[in-house]
Image (cartoon, rainbow, N blue to C red):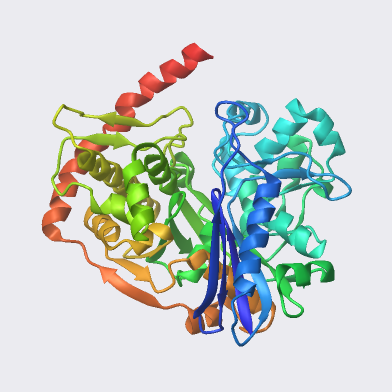
Amino acid sequence: MSLLGLDIGTTGCKAIVFDPEGKVLAGSYREYSLVHPRPGWNELDVHTLWDGVRTVIQEVNAVPFIEPVAAMGISCQGEAVIPMDLNGDPLYHFIITFDSRTGHMPAWWKERLSPEDIFSITGMPLHPMYTINKILWFKEEGRDIFKKTWKFLCVEDYIIFRLTGEAVIDFSLAARTMAFDVRTSDWSPVMLSAAGIETEKLAVPAPSGTAVGRIRKDLLCSLGFKGPVTVATGGHDQACGALGSGVYRSGTAMAAMGTSEVICPVSDRPCLTPYMLEHNYSSSAHVETGKYVALAVNLNGGLLLRWYRDTLCEREVTDAEQSGTDPYDLIISEASEEWKSIYILPHLVGSGTPHFDTASKGAILGLTNETTKGDITRALLVSLVLETKIDLVHLAEAGFCIRDLRAIGGGAKSDRWLQMKADGLGIPIRRMKVTEAASLGAALLAGKASGVYASCREGIEHAVQGGRIFEPDPRVRQQYEEHFAEYRAVYPSLATFYHGINKNRS
């Protein structure tokens, strides 16, 4: 039998078919665009999403391989939500992670519960991006939609519902709603009562790797499947990526290099300390039962590179199309080798951890008439490295001493980019053989649900393999250390300015 891992991100989706030993049998990817009805609003049209999902599944099923797909799991972005009516029809677009319309919600919550209480229940530091705030926006600003809503579904439970007719969400994704109790693994009565949201309006939580049902017969043929297919609960893309890169013990962590850049270490219990809360690090269920993950997030990883590609790299895109290469590889290859006093604050959609400052914006500092495009490219890449380094420093203080980073995602395919990461972070970085580890993690969960593996650990032993290790160069590392000391002053220096702008506009 073969297993399908469906990975649904903010700006694209992919389907990859694996054999039980982790060999890639077929893969397909579709990129899609977001909708911006107002400044700061970021939405994903549900029809665009479903068309992308349907297309990638059809394309992998069109590839001839010996064993047909027997089970599939879903890895997906967190926080996004869509309202559905009683007929199962969407009433609005998906509101995605970094949408800004819920910026006022932390103040709303503080009138009802303290940030400490919220964190102790949910493992989520108070922040406007979480799903429950988006549901509250419908309750406040879209009352007609709220009244008509049968279920508010995140991406995983929406796709499961489309495929099987069942509305089920796994624990790791439910945690990203800020409505889930990390201690009891169920919806929190305290959070839902404070928000005035009924449990019945949400999907049913279940452990990752649970068999929900089979794909509806009327969809099997149109999607290209050759026989019955079991649909399993998967998980939040970061937790799935950690599973697909074999991260299940302390000292190891996943380094995801996708739309967002994420460091994901694991622990044996929720880490709900004041330090974690102070620095905005979440702690929630891993997709492997009995394990927990912490997340350090830079929202502006691949998103920043995509902006740079689309806005300032028209020539590179054209050259890549003509030569049949990846435009990102060409952009990165043209980055300057020299260190220049140029600093980029990569906060296009606000900062990630440890600040989680929605008012922060991007900036380029230190431009002169001698600055080249290659200098800017290098500064952009270095800024992403140093944002991650800030998180590693704080995670170490929180008790996560990371000695082995496992790189996954589109960015992990670049040798130069990974070497820059290793040099800047001062830690060996292992590129996994399957860099699309979120899809592999989802497939492993499908294998667990369908009996191919007795456990996630067995799936890892059979299917997860490491690849090349990038060791830090001591000489270059010292240059990064000197640059890092200066870089850490950039955000604090600009924060007051940005907050003043926001206050004046308000």
x%, y% of residue 259?
47, 50
Which residue of the protein is positioned furthest toward the front in this rendering?
Answer: 322
- Please tell me which residue is depicted at 46% across the width and 46% down the height of the picture: 276
x%, y% of residue 433?
40, 74
Which residue of the protein is positioned furthest toward the left in this rendering?
Answer: 475
Q: Quadrant of residue 314?
A: top left
Q: Is residue 216 above or below residue 119?
A: below
Q: Is residue 496 above or below residue 330?
A: above
From the image, which quarter does the N terminus lie in? bottom right
- Please tell me which residue is depicted at 83% across the width and 71% down the height of the picture: 217
x%, y% of residue 237?
55, 58
* Any part of residue 174 in sight: no
Q: Nearer the viewer, residue 174 or 69?
A: 69
From the image, which quarter does the C terminus lie in? top right
x%, y% of residue 196?
79, 35
Q: Is residue 162 left or right of residue 316?
A: right
Which residue of the protein is positioned furthest toward the right in this rendering?
Answer: 86
- Please tell me which residue is depicted at 63% across the width and 45% down the height of the picture: 80
Q: Quadrant of residue 68?
A: bottom right
Q: Is residue 435 left or right of residue 456?
A: left
Q: Is residue 153 above or below residue 436?
A: above
Q: Nearer the viewer, residue 367 or 76?
A: 367
* Any part of residue 389 in sight: yes
Q: Nearer the viewer, residue 173 or 13?
A: 13
Numbered marks: total: 0
Q: Quadrant of residue 373?
A: top left
Which residue of the protein is positioned furthest toward the top in this rendering?
Answer: 504
